[in-house]
Amino acid sequence: MIETTFTPVTSLVGGALIGLAAVLLMLFQGRIAGISGIVSRLLPPDADGETGGRLAFVAGLVLAPLVVYAARSAWPAPQIAATIPILVVAGLLVGFGSVWGNGCTSGHGICGLSRLSLRSLIAVATFMASAIATVFVVRHLL
Amino acid sequence: MSILVQFAAGLIFGLGLILAGMANPAKVLNFLDLAAIPAGRWDASLLFVMAGGIAVTMLGYRLTFARGRPLLAERFALPSASRPDARLVSGAVLFGIGWGLAGFCPGPALVAALTGGAPALIFLAAMLAGMILARRLASSSVRPAEQGRA
């Protein structure tokens, strides 16, 4: 495993920024900041005329590292330990599961819990449990 | 204006993910590894991401909903308060397994597109394929009668 350090302050501030983005989207557009919902509705089948706004949001996400680079002259580097076959399986599961379950860490985890949605609470408890169980199996049993 | 707001929201969201450490799969997996607690190697940072995110969103949503309608849209587009069902739970189980295998969820996967090299792009491509598959399956299961006739 790759060691990481405990960063309560930057994580709290980062979380608050995520919250700010979610509030902006609701205040201006009346929409939930659910990444899986926004991205999947850009994909076939059927589009509904909100494509421009969704593309703009996704473009903002993709270009965010440029802002970090401009400020720090260093790219934020994601540390990815998984092998290619695992990445393919994981990607399929994340994509399929988030659409099938109507949300991911953002839509259910941030927006849904903030609205005190029972569906989101159940979804979050379920995916946290299955993710924790998966990491346990991969790291400690296999 | 609407496009600009959504671009800014995406940018702020992405910056938040990077600053929080959520955009780094290693950090996510070290948070999900509860068995590391006794050894003192558990990274609890993501609890703080949730706390910061939910605190701001809860307060901001409350103030926003009190306005009655959004600034640039006719109404709030909120998910209907339907009951939890088997589909919600099975989707969440599958999502959690994928999240636990690679440490990526949809937002961080997009944020890593420019900086994560081939592994990040491979995950992203598989994720989009999974989404298309689920949407096709969902749209066909909504119209079982038509499917039956076909």
Image (cartoon, grey):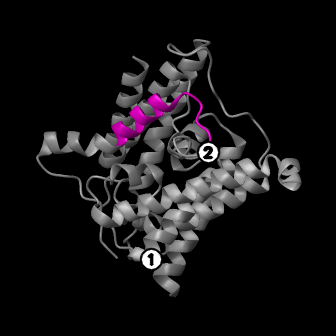
The residue under the point 39% across, 64% down is: B122
Q: CA distance from mark 1 to mark 2?
A: 27 Å
Q: Which residues are magenta?
A: A46-61
**What amino acid is found at the position of numbered circle 1 in the picture?**
Pro
Residue sitting at x 63%, y 26%: B77
Residue B129 location, x and y as percent? 53, 59
Label ID, residue A45? 2
The image shows residue A77, relative to residue A106, as above or below, that is below
Marking on residue B82: none
- Amino acid type, callout 2: Pro
**In the visual, does A121 lie left or right of A84?**
right
Callout 1: few (<14), some (14-19), or many (20+) C-alpha neighbours within 10 Å?
Answer: few
Does B111 sit left or right of B72 as displayed? Answer: left
Secondary element at tag 2 = loop
Q: Mark 1 or mark 2: which is in front?
A: 2
Residue at 72% in and 47% down: B139
Depth order, front residue of A38/A80: A38
Residue that carries the numbered disc 1 in the rendered image:
A85
Residue at the spot 49% in from the left edge and 80% down from the top edge? A138
Magenta-highlighted stretch: main secondary structure? Answer: helix
The picture places residue A64, in percent across and down from the top left corner, at 29, 41
- Kindly tell me whether residue B56 is visible in this rendering: no
Residue A125: x and y in percent read 64, 56
In the drawing, does residue A113 fall left or right of residue A62? right
Tag 1, which chain? A
* Whether residue A93 can be seen here: yes
- Position of residue B76 measured from the top left corner of the image (x, y, whole percent): 62, 22
